[in-house]
Amino acid sequence: MKYKSQAVAKLYFIAALVLFAAQVIFGLIMAYQYVVGDFLFPEIPFNVARMVHTNTLIVWLLFGFMGAAYYLVPEESERELYSPLLAKVLFWVFLVAAGLTVAGYLLVPYAQLAELTMNELWPTMGREFLEQPTITKLGIVVVALGFLFNIGMTILTGRKTVVNVVMLTGLLGLAVFFLFSLYNPANLVLDKYWWWWTVHLWVEGTWELILGSILAFVLIKTTGVDREVIEKWLYVIIAMALITGILGTGHHYYWIGTPEYWQLVGSVFSAMEPIPFFMMTVFAFNMVNQRRKDHPNKAAVLWALGCAVMAFLGAGVWGFLHTLAPVNYYTHGTQITAAHGHMAFYGAYAMIVLAMISYSMPFMTHGKPANSNKAQIIEMWGFWLMTVSIVFITLFLTGAGILQVWLQRMGTNPESFMAAQDSISIFYWLRFATGWVFLAGLLVYFYSFFAGGEPKEENA
Amino acid sequence: MSDKFTKSMARNIFIGGSLFFFLLFLGLTFDTMSSLPKRDHRENITPQVASGKMLWEENNCIGCHTLLGEGAYFAPELGNVYKRFGENKEVIKAFIKSRPVTGIPGRRSMPQFNLTDQQLDDLAEFLKWTSEIDTNNWPPNIQG
Ligand code: HEM
Ligand code: HEM
Ligand SMILES: [Fe+2]
């Protein structure tokens, strides 16, 4: 850590990890409701648990991205953060807003929350992932503007590198495309059309820029490879991401009322979306192989490599699996979708945030580049437990999904949805059990922060 | 990567490529917007349908169900429920109305939303309108 103000990132990372834990606990609640349907009913119905699960996911990733930006932007720009105070104020605003929103989900029925927050004045609630009350959405916009101002001023008045400019572009895009969440026409088809401008153009667009720049930063720092080489890779990766990902949005426009030509456009372009993810994997391994130094933080390198591989598997391979229109006709909205959602979100976005945390936390806690051997080994146990769990959760959900399609959507005498669900419950039991291993991995990972031992110095 | 391929070439591909495809996307969006009215039958979006959509949202139905394949995968697809229930709004209304407050022991349970008859009717109208959207023949069969 070169600048004092980078340390605000620590607050953001701690909040991210606490919300991550909440996310996983609500995931487990739902996984049990999948097999014992009335668990916690009517206190925490499935839909409420799901909102908490997905909203805490998004918010902890946003905390993670902001923390990553506050850490890497000053270092890249070679100056202190424009306003550390603003960063702290916005942190508390965002945390309180997120806390109140989740409390609202859990404490009152959703319809009452809608009434309390006057949803009828500007109805934006009740759409998947965008369940937040309108006032919370506006709060997010305000926090994002303040954050972009702070980061933007730091970059504009400092050194501009490819890493920080790409990061800023990605964050700007994130804020711009979030604005579509405030548009909710009464026509369901239009609602769905524009909903994807937030959801798809986030995860298969602007967020890839953020992912790429964090990955590039961590690789520059841990491998010592020439910045020129890394920056060229970064440009090529994000170029491929947007060239394929923008029209790739078409893979969501097959069956929602939109014209048929999207089946062709969406299939062709989204079939190429794995390319940038594949390039990220090649890039990460190449840079580590060509490293000029052996960085003592082995755990951070493991997270970075793991992220590249898992993002390719989750987004690239599992995305490709169901992206062609003739396949998607059968798999659309089944457990296959959930399988892909889990590995992609974990592999690409959870892991990149965890990689950044792993790289930067040692500097912020004790000023040395790496934790003790013991702490790193525990952290790596956390890595493997969580990552292997997600792989198995994905495989079980894929099994469930294939059978679901077979039983419910094919043949001459298809089963009803609920009958098919009963037929495949063994997979849900296996997913539930694996969820516990994931939670154990998370706890092991948390424990690594308290493991102590002698921090490691820079290798000679 | 080869040395002849420079960083500024890579940057230009990024900027040019994303701009080009974004403009193309805007163009296709424009075309879609002009052909949608025929497919979504927006002339049938009465105030009742609009109110039904709002009720759908304010009770977070999407948190358990899919609608045209999007949403949660815990409960049945509802884009075609009007057809599955024999094109009968009363069956839909009776189903929603009769959910037990404390659930069904051991089974996935739908909450009792305590909707008025007017609200039930609005919701059913919304689901009826939804079932008439031209979805390119999705879902593959009536089970959704
Ligand atoms: C890291 C990047 C990605 C993330 C985080 C991600 C996440 C998700 C999530 C959460 C959904 C479910 C949305 C919903 O609830 O309706 C979804 C749907 C989908 N994704 Fe991705 N995705 C990523 C990349 C990709 C890529 C690269 C492809 C194609 C190669 C792809 C193909 C699809 C398709 C076809 C669907 C629709 C599934 C359906 O019809 O039900 N995704 N994605
Ligand atoms: C113990 C671990 C976990 C369990 C048991 C679990 C369980 C679940 C369940 C039951 C759902 C709802 C599926 C439905 O709508 O029917 C869900 C949705 C989701 N979860 Fe998890 N989850 C876990 C961890 C995670 C992690 C680590 C991530 C990402 C980092 C994640 C991301 C998501 C996403 C994006 C969705 C929405 C998927 C979609 O719409 O297709 N979950 N999860
Ligand atoms: Fe997508």
Image: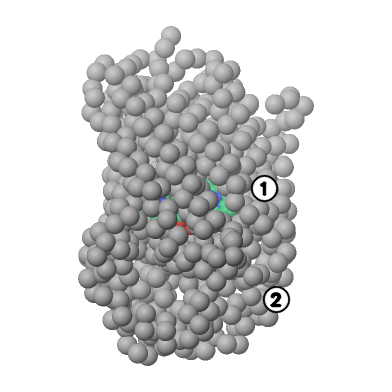
Residue A186 lies, in percent from the top left, at 51, 79
Do the CB atoms of the residues marked 2 and 1 lie less than 8 Å apart?
no
The residue under label 2 is: B34
Q: Chain of mark 2?
A: B
Against A327, is A20 above or below? above
Identify the element where label 1 is drawn.
Answer: helix
Looking at this rendering, what residue extends furthest in the front direction? A413
> Disc 2 versus disc 1: distance between alpha carbons?
27 Å
Res. B50 in view: no
| Side (left or right) of A417 relative to A24 | right
Q: Amino acid at mark 2?
A: Ser
Task: Give the colour scheme shown.
Answer: one colour
Q: Chain of mark 1?
A: A
Identify the element where label 2 is drawn.
Answer: helix
The residue under label 1 is: A271
Residue B136 lies, in percent from the top left, at 66, 69
